[in-house]
Structures are given as structure tokens and as C-alpha cells.
Image (cartoon, helix red, strand yellow):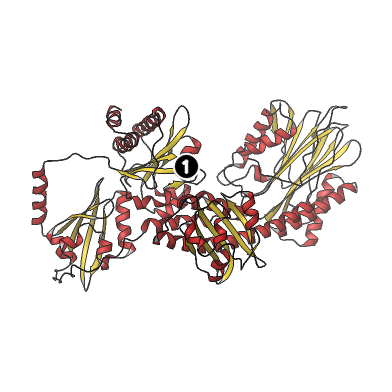
Amino acid sequence: MSGMSESFLGAASLDDALGAGLAATVRRTGASAGALYLLDAADGVLRLGWLSGIPEDFSTPWQRLSPISPTPVTDAVREDRLVWLGGQDEMVRRYPRIAAVLPYPFAMAAMPLTGARRCWGAIGLMWPADHPQHVTARERHNITTSARHLARLLEDSSRPPTLHDRPRIVTPGAVAGPAQTGLAACDYLERLPEGAVSLDLEGRITFLTTDAARLLGRRTEQLLGTRPWQSLPWLDDPVYEDHYRTAVVSRVPVTYAACRPPDQWLTFELHPGSSGISVRITPRKEYTAVLPTPADLPRPEPAPMGRLHQLVHLAAALTETVTVQDLVDLITHQILPAFGAQGLMLTSAEAGRLRIVGHHGYPGGVVERLDALDLDTELTPAGDVLAAGTAAFFGSQDEIAAGYPSTVHLSDKTAWAFLPLTISGRPVGCCVLSYDRPHTFTADERAVLTSLAGLIAQALDRARLYDTQRHLVAALQRTLLPRALPTVPGLDVAVRYLPAGPGLDVGGDFYDVLPLDDTTVAAVIGDVEGHGVTAAALMGQVRLAVHAHTTAGAAPDKVLLRTNRLLADLDSELLVSCLYAHIDLARHEVTLTNAGHVPPLLRRAPGRADVVHLEPGPLLGVGTGGHYPVTTVGFPPGSVLALYTDGLVEAPGTDATHATERLAERLAAGADLDLHRLVDHLLRTTERTGQSADDITALLLRPTEQGEGVLPVQPSAQPGRLT
């Protein structure tokens, strides 16, 4: 670390030292690019402070990152570990939004800057496409020690670093050669029968030979300092700029052909390096001279590629939102930081009024004042913006006061972007981004926000429809499931129901506990195939059928047999699994019968739990010719019987048998927990990650000694997802 330490010590300030530290990290790790993020204590976001090896506009979508946004840098900070991505395939699998914006092959690492007192931020590093898929031990060591050194530098400083609105660009450094060598290289290039051009990392031409200018059809002074796709109309195509982006990000040579009007085809060979790109230009047939364009020809404005890629990034994120709350969270944590805004008002147009469905950065009194405004309100520009279908931008209080003086006094905001949310001319609502300080809205920022409004409108309309459907189905399911399980003397009971993850309707899990007399109890659990209204309705019919046959005194196997006949009469296309338990508290035994359901678990003594292997009968609804074998096992006081649905042990990429064995081990290890804490423990510690593709129900039963108190049953009317 001596080289890095010397560069730190030689820096004039903390800001310079951090930039030098990033440059040294890029050199030591052999990375092609690097970024240094710092946590902003004011709003909790990660802000890009220093950038090396790639143009600034490439980083536009990620200059401000919410701590909960799905990126390698935020994951590294949140999980306090090195995050490594070996290539584009892994990026697509783990971070599809980033892959959509940077569809280029490269390897990447992110490492938190964790000190003794706190986490200060993170560094992100990129390697060329030919880097091995796995990080080497030497690279891991260099990344870790560099991050540790940067964190120590931040902790030892007497003042925090300066956070600017835009990242500072640093270079890894290069060895300078004698001036004579540079002149000789220029002479060498001029003598070659082909064009040679040098681009910096921003894509600007820093050098070109006489033949290159002739082939491109411009004079040298017209091309120096410009980007080829801006100064040459026939190269003004996103495809050609994307070739340049591929070379910069992936650090691999790129070759393509382009036609200079009217019919001159040229081959461009791009050879990237740490300081820029060398371009070789050769004609594909005999070159015909073309008169140069006049020197005073106006050049087009730079294309805002960073903003366009930011729009792609946010558009991909918007497609993943399901509920209105998802949309509000996305705007709050990703769109507001991306545009430097601090406040949000998201409204939907309902019955001639603007109802606030989400907000951020406003006190409750302001929200209450702005809720349910008429669509033709003059209190704010929202009504006029929605009526006209055109966004309105106000960079200061003076600007908005000219037409809407009341808006200035509603809050302490000083700049606003009012974005109408419309779909095919139909008003959906209005999205308002606001700023704590005056803000200048650039032309490209206005264009991106306006485009983003259309995507937000689609997401809001879709989310409102989903929420309505989900609430209806959830209400149906709540009416079909028991509102509360009965208190049974001599038996502790605990139950949990977790709905499926976002994007899926409510499922068909059901359960019940039915006291039959003073010493016998029936417990049932089942799962209807599929999700949605049909599954929920069938679940209610099956549960009521089981309840009716049980209370009528039918034996366990007869309960399932008669319920199966009911499903045959209903001619349902859905199948149902069901597990029925008849508990005899006096005899200390339980009789079980199974209709294609996952097997129960039984813990007879502390430290030991087993899978109860039952001979299964057919699923309910398969046909009327099957039978349902019964199995009776001991169930003494203190034992725990665990009934559950397959969502607890079955998930893509997992082995259900191994997952069931691990669940039994956890049941055995929870001997010191009461029943409610035990069921929570089982649901929290499953091997499943992310959102579940299926709903989950777990029902635990434990006989008690005569005279022991009975635990209150957790009501099932208010299911909740555990965190």
C-alpha cells in the first residue's frame, strides 16, 4: 500500500486525497473504471463523488442512489460485503435494470467503505469483458485493503468531504514520454495510407491525421474537440454512438462500417484504452474526394445520452411496480434522488377531484390541505396542467407566484415540476416534484421528466386496478377463513398465514380447528391449486364441506372422501390438497389422513423432530374412486404437531425433501420458544429468498398437561408478512 499512501499524503485536501485514492485503487486492481460513492447524511442517499475511466454522462442514472435501490453498490453497503459480478449474464440475472441500461460485457465489483465508527460509502470498479468470471485472491485483497484505507482516511479527517452536484473526474495516471517520441508518432501516423483518430473517454476528438480528416470529409479544425456523431451528420445515429459506448465500457475492440454520402463506405476500428480510444479508418473501396462542408456550418447540440439511459433505467424500474405503494416508494427513493428533488405529491383523478395517493417531504397539514382538490383548482397549477396535458416547470417562487400566488404559501418549497399523468387523453392524475432550493430545469431534464410522466401514468393506472382487485379478493378470502380459532382446553394452537409476493393474487390456502367434544379436536389444513377469485371461492367451499362432515361425526377418512365427492359434483378444474388431523387429548394420540398434501412434522421431545410419513390419498377433485388411508401416532403433552402448506418448503431452485428436513431441524431446535414465537421462527428462517411465488400457512398444535394454561390463538383475520 505504499504507493497509495504516498498519493494520499501528497494530496492537498481530503477531496484531493479521495480522488487520488480512487485513481490508485483503479491502478492497483487493474480495473478499467472506478467510482467512489459517499453517504449523504442529509438525505441518506449514496452520491457519486469521484469517477475514473468512463465519461460522466454514462453515470447519470446512478449519480444518486437510494439505499434500497437494487444496485451492486447499495447491496454492498446494505450487506457490508464485497459484491462481485463476473459478466453480463450475471448482471442480467441479478440486476436486470442495470443490464438494460448498460448492455455491454464487463465485470464489476462493489465494496463498502466501512470504518470503525460507520459505513462512509462504497467504491465500484469495472473490468474489461475479457476478465475471468471469478475475482482473484489478489484482486480481492487489493479491493479490500483499498476500501479500508479510504474509510480510514474519512474517519481520520477533521471535516467531512465536499459533496458536489456532479462527480469529479480523476485519471489513473500515465507515464509521460519525451516530447520527441510524440512528434515521431505523429509523423509515423501521417505517413500511413489510412486515417487515425484519437478520442478521449468523453468521445471528443483530440487528434486526427490529415488522411482521417479527408476520409471524414471535414477540415481538421472543424473536427477537433467535437464528437464524431455530432459533427458528422451521417454518423448521427445511436447505433454508432453505442459502438463507442461498448468500447469504453467493455474495453474490447469494436469494428463497424458506415457510409459517407453518397456512396463512400468506411471501416472504423475502435481500440479502447485507459485514457481514450484509438480509431483506425480505412476505405472499403477507392476513395472519391468530396468538398468539405463550409466552416461556419452550425454543429448540433450534444445528445443527452446520459439522460436517455437514465430514462431507460427508470422505465425498467417502473415496469416492476405492482401496487400504488410500490410506485410511491420508487418515485421517492429513485426518481427524486435522480433529479435532485426533495418533495413528492402523487395524485389520482377520481370523481372530479385530485386525491393524494402518495407523498414525501411534506408535513401532514399541507397534505391534508391539498387532498381532494377540484380538477379545476386554481390553488396550484395541477388542475391546469392536467387539463392542458402539458408539463409545467417553475424554477423559483417568483416564477410560480406570477400565475399561482397561493402555491408559494402552501409549503416551504421553492421550485416545482408539475407532470400531468394522462393515458390516451384520459386524465389519470398529476405527479409533482418539488425542491427545497431554486432549480434550473435544463432542456434535456424537462424532456426526460415529460417522457417519464407517461410511464408513471401507465404505472399508476395499472397499480390502482391491481390494488382494487387485490383488496376485493383479500376481502373474499377473509370472509372464508376463520376470523379467530377457538380456545381449546388442553391444547395450545398458533397459526400464521402469509400471502404470496407482489404481482400475484391471493391464494387458496385454508385451515381450521374444530372442537368436537371435551377431549377431541379436529385440525385441517389445505391448499387449492392456483390463485385469484376462483381459488379463494373454491377454498371456502372445501373448508365448509370439511367443517360440515367433521361436525356431523364422520371419521377422518370419510371426511376427505365425502369432500372429494363434493368437488366431483362441482366439476371444478382446480385440485385441492388437504391434511386432516383428529386429536384425542385423553388417549394422547392423533389420527392423520392425507389427500396429496405435504407431510406434517412431529416433535415428541426437545431436540428431536421427524417427518410423519403418511400413505397419501389422491388430491381432492381427481376422481371418486380413491380411498384415504389413516395413520395413528402418539401425541403426548409437550409434543408439537406442525401442519403447513407447500409454499413453506417448495420454491424454484430448492429441493423440497431437503427443505422439509431442514424445517424439522428448526422445529427441534425451538424447544425453548412458546408456540407463537416458534411459528414465527419457522417462517423467518426458511431457505426461501425474495418474494414467495406461493402463499404460506403454518399451523402448530401442542397438547398441554391437565391444568396448564392455554395460549391465546393468534387471530387469522389480519395476516401479515413477517420482516
Inspect this view and state whether residue 456 appears: yes
* Location of residue 394 in the rendering, given as x and y in whole percent from the top left corner: 47, 60
Q: Going 27% across and 29% down the picture, which residue do you hit?
A: 6
Question: Where does label 1 land, which residue?
Answer: 74
Residue 634 makes an appearance in the image: no
Q: Quadrant of the C terminus?
A: top right
Q: In the rendered view, tell whether residue 50 sits above or below residue 492.
A: below
Relative to residue 38, is residue 329 drawn left or right? right
Relative to residue 674, is residue 80 drawn left or right? left
Q: Is residue 133 left or right of residue 335?
A: left
Q: For the residue labelled by badge 1, is the local secondary structure a helix, a strand or a loop? A: helix
| Residue 169 rendering spot, x and y as whole percentages | 31, 45
- Residue 266, x across and y down, in percent: 21, 65
Q: Residue furthest bottom?
A: 262
Q: Quadrant of residue 242?
A: bottom left
What residue lies at 12% left-to-right and 46% top-to-bottom?
A: 182
Q: Amino acid at mark 1?
A: Thr
Observer-nearest of 467 and 584: 467
Q: Callout 1: few (<14), some (14-19), or many (20+) C-alpha neighbours within 10 Å?
A: many
Q: Nearer the viewer, residue 690 or 449?
A: 449
298 vs 79, nearest the viewer: 298
Which quadrant of the view contains residue 215? bottom left
Rendered view: 82 above or below 68? above
For image coordinates 21% across by 62% down, the residue present is: 267
With respect to residue 183, does 723 lie above or below? above
Q: Quadrant of the N terminus?
A: top left
